[in-house]
Amino acid sequence: MPVILEKKYENGISLAIWQITEQHDELQAMLPSEILTDAELASISHPQKQIEFFCSRLVIKYLANSLGINYLGIKKDEHGKPYLAGTDWQMSLTHTSNYVAAVMHPSRSLGIDMEKPTEKLSRIKHKFMSEAELASTENDFENLCIYWSAKEALYKLYGKRKVIFNENLHVSPFEKGVSCIQGRLLINEIDKNYDIYIERIDGYILVVAG
């Protein structure tokens, strides 16, 4: 089972990262039929997307089991936000072509995202960063990726639509190489700050907000 990192942060959030090395049929065989339904599988046509789907369910199953939670599958609420069936534990998932990661907490809303720094973020930074955020960072691809992923994680944590990234989601200035930064969700009646943890995995940036 290729879980390459499992840890618990100081605020009680548990993280597990799965490196995708298995073949399609091997992964499918690891999921019981009560968790992987035919309808779910039929809704995903691309084989690589199916692999990512399998691994996302396997990593959350692994993390739930390690925390003593009976994993009954994942459902989605009216806003499309995934949640764990049969428990009040909070969760969030992210995946790339190489990795899948999950976080869980007994009660705290969560968000997670994993991206690789690319030049594209420099071209679109004005779309997701405020003027203050743009002024606080140089054109550093890793830092831009942290801003982007932190806001994606805050967006997942919020779990609803109609979010303007450069107005509703804020990230405090930070120094290069840090492992924890501060984020703020400011939308409608909500004005709340969150810890955002940073992991660097094989050229990827993974962030956890909660």
Image (cartoon, grey):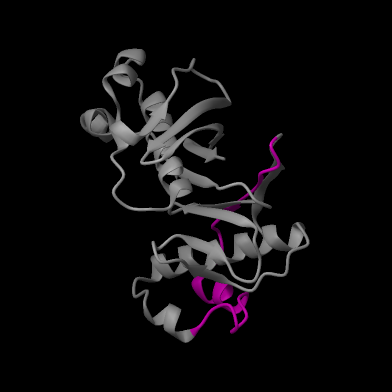
Q: Where in the figure is residue 4, as x and y percent of width and height? A: 65, 48
> Would you place residue 204 above or below residue 89 in this image?
above
Residue 70 occupies which quadrant of the picture?
A: bottom right
Along the viewing direction, whichever of 90 and 19 lies nearer the viewer: 90
Does residue 9 appear to the left or right of 99 in the view shown?
Answer: right
Does residue 143 appear to the left or right of 33 in the view shown?
Answer: left
Q: Residue at x 34, y 75 (%)?
A: 45
> Would you place residue 4 above or below residue 35 in this image?
above
Q: Residue at x 47, y 85 (%)?
A: 38
Q: Where in the figure is residue 41, as x and y percent of width and height? A: 44, 79
Along the viewing direction, whichever of 90 and 33 lies nearer the viewer: 90
Q: Residue at x 44, y 47 (%)?
A: 158
Q: Residue at x 51, y 26 (%)?
A: 182
> Is residue 13 magenta-colored?
yes
> Would you place residue 68 above or below residue 199 in this image?
below
Q: Where in the figure is residue 169, as x and y percent of width and height? A: 37, 34
Instruction: Quarter of the image for the N terminus: give it.
Output: bottom right
Does residue 103 appear to the left or right of 47 in the view shown?
Answer: right
Label total for image: 0
> Would you place residue 197 above or below residue 48 in this image?
above
Magenta-tinted stretch: 11-37
